[in-house]
Image (spheres, rainbow, N blue to C red):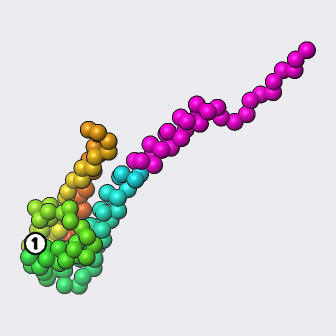
Amino acid sequence: MQALPKHQRGLTFISLCILLGIAGFFVFLVLKIGPIYMDHNKVASALSALKKDSAFPMMTEHEIRRSLDNRFNIGYVDFIAPEDIKVSKSNDYVKVEIAYEVVKPLAYNLSVLVDFHDMIETGGDGGV
């Protein structure tokens, strides 16, 4: 009489391959999309540093754009076009908006689109 086999424990080879495939897919996504958010962090940091500048409320639009351009050059931010930056300025109110999109190819004809919109304001109702 042959003994009955005990319950099998662990993963089969096929289930292990499926789990590794799923994990690999998510690692692939993180490696493709992660740098987009790391670059966006540089843009947000530049805006934050500009807002902390004590001269920011008195700057002209040209000075604000030049200051942002300098900060972007330091951080190697080259994906922001001048038309992505909108500066609104009145007597005691300054608002700077940066809106841009990043399209990153994933595989073959599949791409990811990430849309960013950042804003800082000071003076008037925006208050520092």
Mark 1 — residue?
Answer: 89
Quarter-of-image position of residue 117: bottom left
Q: Quadrant of the N terminus?
A: top right
* Label total for image: 1
Compared with 3, 22 (above or below) is below
Secondary structure under the numbered disc 1 in the rendered image: strand
Compared with 52, 76 (above or below) is above
Quarter-of-image position of residue 78: bottom left
Measuring 26% from the left and 70% from the top, which residue is drawn there? 76
Measuring 29% from the left and 39% from the top, which residue is drawn there? 108
Residue 27 forms part of the magenta stretch = yes
Measuring 13% from the left and 77% from the top, which residue is drawn there? 66
Residue farthest to the bottom, as pictured: 54
Residue 16 visible at all: yes
Q: Which residues are magenta?
A: 1-29
Q: Residues within 10 Å of mark 1 (few under 14, many from 20)?
A: some
Q: Quadrant of the C terminus?
A: bottom left
Quarter-of-image position of residue 124: bottom left
Q: Position of residue 80 (x, y in %)?
A: 18, 63
Name the residue type under label 1: Lys
Measuring 58% from the left and 31% from the top, which residue is drawn there? 14
Left or right? Give the position of 63 relative to 31: left
Residue farthest to the right, as pictured: 1
Left or right? Give the position of 13 relative to 6: left
Compared with 23, 8 (above or below) is above
Residue 22 forms part of the magenta stretch = yes
